Amino acid sequence: MKRLLLVIFAFFALSACNRQQDLAMKSADKDFILKVANEKFEKKKWKDAIALYERLSNLVAGTDDAANVVYNSAYANYYDKNYKLAGHQFKNFAVTFPQDKRAEDASYMSALCYYQGSMDYNLDQSSTELAINELQNFLNSYPNSEKSKNINELIDELTYKLEFKAYENARQYYKMADYRAASVAFENVLEDFPSTKLREKIYDYMLKSKYELAVNSIYDLKKDRIENAIAFTKQVEREVPNSANAKNATDLRTKLEKEKVSLIELEKKVEARKKELQDKQREAEAKQNQEKDLRDAVKKGEQAARDSAKSATPAPSATFPIRK
């Protein structure tokens, strides 16, 4: 019986709440709508509160209630996980009511909403870049805020997401055996994020990429790529001595030096073969020239003989017409 009474009481209470929400949604009384909206907000009925605050946006414009409506609506959307809308509303509050004591909190919450809207690293990261800008704007506007430490941590987290995105893109090139593209992509990661926490892994992939690119390169590009790979192994040893990367760099350089020696021997054979072919080509050209000269001499001799015979033949005597 007691449980039945509780169910009945809850039913009537819910009905009363729903009826009050419906009345507020249909009402034109600003004060009544605001009263119900605030009650819904206090009871964490976010969707009901949001709907009523939306109705109030035009009704309270220019009044003392405007700031509270924008502020509460922003929080209601934040708690309802409408981060994009909440971020816009918080930002609007901070810009519209800069003298309000809640302006700093609104600016912080705006940046936090953009942070919440950042997509996973394997998706488009324009939202992450926007979030970093908004967080940095908060630091610039409130450099002495107690929230600054938290903001810096959020920026570091988002920056790492961008680093990891770039790192994974470069790693995909390596997995596809496109070592040239992988090497360039990893270099870009280091250039864009000089303080990256992924430097050790990046160096490992760069060493392997440059090595594979060098040893599997075509003949005309092999020398330069071997030299480039050797130079990078020395750079790694200088920058991270006594590390696993340094040891790997030393091992790979030993292999690259052997590859360089083999390439030098190959170059000698290629040059020798090239010289041999050039000599044969010159001999063939010389022979062709001799044969041509001989043919030309024969032609000249034959022409001279014809000219001589022609000059030795007497001209025919003159003839006269016979008169009848």
Image (tube, rainbow, N blue to C red):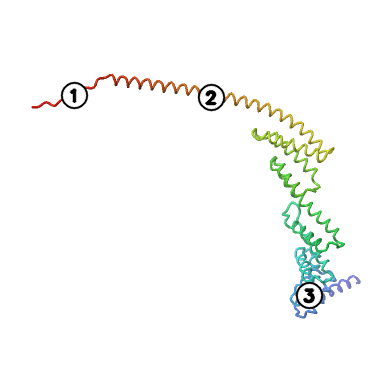
Amino acid identity at mark 1: Ala
Residue at image position (74%, 30%) is 257
Q: Position of residue 318 (x, y in %)?
A: 18, 24
Q: Position of residue 260 (x, y in %)?
A: 71, 30
- The residue furthest left is 324
**Location of residue 42 (image quadrant):** bottom right
User: Which of pointers 2 and 1 lies earlier in the amino acid sequence?
Assistant: 2
Can the viewer see residue 72 in this picture? no
Please tell me how crowded label 1 is: few (under 14), some (14-19), or many (20+) other residues with Cα within 10 Å. few
- For disc 3, the marked residue is 66
- Foreground: disc 3 or disc 2: 2
Q: Mark 3 and mark 2: span between their CA atoms?
A: 96 Å
Amino acid identity at mark 3: Ala
Front-most of residues 9 and 18:
18
User: Which of pointers 3 and 2 lies earlier in the amino acid sequence?
Assistant: 3
Q: Mark 1 and mark 3: span between their CA atoms?
A: 134 Å
Q: Mark 2 and mark 1: span between their CA atoms?
A: 59 Å
Residue at image position (56%, 25%) is 278
**Location of residue 47 (image quadrant):** bottom right
Residue at image position (68%, 35%) is 224
| SS class, disc 3 | helix
| Quadrant for the C terminus in the image | top left
Q: Which mark is residue 245?
A: none
Q: Position of residue 210 (x, y in %)?
A: 72, 38
Please tell me how crowded label 3 is: few (under 14), some (14-19), or many (20+) other residues with Cα within 10 Å. some
Amino acid identity at mark 2: Arg
- The residue furthest right is 2
When the figure is inspected, residue 166 is found, relative to residue 250, above or below; the finding is below
Q: Which mark is residue 318?
A: 1
- Please give left or right for residue 264 compared with residue 97 in the image: left
